[in-house]
Amino acid sequence: MNKHLRSCIKGALLIFTSVLATNSQAQWNKQTSGTAEILRSVKFTGSGSGYAVGDKGTILYTSNGGSTWGAQSSGVTTHLNSVDFTDNTKGWAVGDDGIILTTVNGGTNWSKQTSPDKNKLRSVDFIDENQGVAVGSTSNFGLSYIIYTTNGGQNWTKAEYSTADILFTVVQLNSSKGLAMGNHGGVFRSSNGGANWSVFTIGTGPSIRSVSFADASKGWLVGTSGDIYHTTNGGDFWDEQNSGVSTQLNGVYFVNSSKGYAVGNEGVILVTTNGGTTWTEQYSGTTEDLYSIAFTDTDNGWIVGSNGTILHTSNGGNPTSTLNAKDMGIQFYPNPVSRTSGINVEYTNNSALDISLLNHLGTVVYKSSEFDTKSERIDLNNLELTPGVYLLRIADGDKQMSSKVLVY
């Protein structure tokens, strides 16, 4: 390497040192759900009480933070897409074919409420035990659909709005103002509790899947191409943030105005500690698609997804202590390595490894979970890397390691 390149790498190494601390393996652990159905929504009502809903009428409940999950009887086989509770006893779940379920005893019993139509409901949000909004799509042309209630769902009424694309998510910021969002950047806004809605479009039209507000002003939304947008004025204007991924993001949750998470397909978990100025990827330990995330405080969070996946963290997903390559029986070489060459990884055990390569911004530039032999080669030639310091991240179940790699 020439003198100029050594100087560049030395500078990159200083920058990378701080990134290394936030991109070491994070602590998310699988919980036993007892189902293989897709779980699409999760909601916690207290420190240990939580609910997850999903396909074929699945409703799961835990009273101990997920140490054990048990099935509740929904009385339906329809896919359930969203769940919300206003306290420890009163909740609602919505799904396909206009299904609306409610409970007044923490899920011991669920009963049906009457929807105006048999349209697909994808999201529900109650601001109190009386006022709620549900959104989705019509069954015929897949257009936007909004209904609301002012009496806890005893009566649901179709709202007044201009027809647009499918809606995937809804949030009520207060008793008057609400936002509903969906395909092609479509955002519906209500100022009268959900009875009437006006529509506008965000940016270049991202397909929005989820929204979360830390307070009445600051909110974030996520979409299908790794899109993340942020508002500081209650949703009137939105600015794009760089997620560092192109994977579809399905869920977002902010525990406060600084710290938030986004989850998506292929096991992607992103975290920010500065309101989204920068996002970094955490290690999920799964390649299942992840759909929904909820926290009860800054430390305890849960994620649900495909194949009955439930993940839990008790430390906010913060990095755990990592082993070195020798301790894990791993060798990788060469280091430094040419960007037109490759990295060879050898493992003493015949095991499935998760291998990732991240740049100095924390963006994943290579990821593989298909490794089930004792050796693999990471071909760098097709990755179009720039010279600098990268992080090689390898996990085998609970055993994890991270190491810096110089690419020239």
Image (cartoon, grey):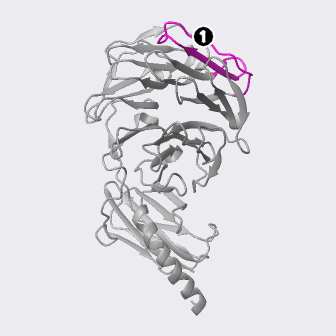
| 186 magenta-colored | no
Residue occupying image coordinates x 45% and y 25%: 83
Residue 233, given in percent of the width and then of the height, sits at 60, 41
Residue 15, given in percent of the width and then of the height, sits at 49, 74
Residue occupying image coordinates x 66% and y 17%: 139
Give the answer, above or below, for where 219 lies relative to 350: above
Nearer the observer, 253 or 251: 253
Quarter holding the C terminus is: bottom right
Furthest residue to the bottom?
Answer: 3
16 vs 167, left or right, is left
Residue 186, given in percent of the width and then of the height, sits at 69, 33
Quarter holding the N terminus is: bottom right
Tell me which corner region of the image, top left, top right, bottom left or bottom right, holds residue 129.
Answer: top left
Tell me which segment is drawn in magenta. 137-165
Secondary structure predominantly adopted by residues drawn in magenta: loop
Residue occupying image coordinates x 52% and y 27%: 174
Give the answer, above or below, for where 342 lies relative to 30: below
Residue where numbered disc 1 is placed: 157
Give the answer, above or below, for where 54 lies relative to 202: above
Q: Secondary structure at mark 1?
A: strand
Nearer the observer, 1 or 259: 259
Mark 1 burial class by Cα count in 10 Å: few <14, some 14-19, many 20+:
some
Residue 316, given in percent of the width and then of the height, sits at 36, 49
Nearer the observer, 60 or 371: 60
Amino acid type, label 1: Thr
Residue occupying image coordinates x 31% and y 36%: 32
Does any portion of residue 36 appear in the rendered image?
A: no
Does any portion of residue 265 appear in the rendered image?
A: yes
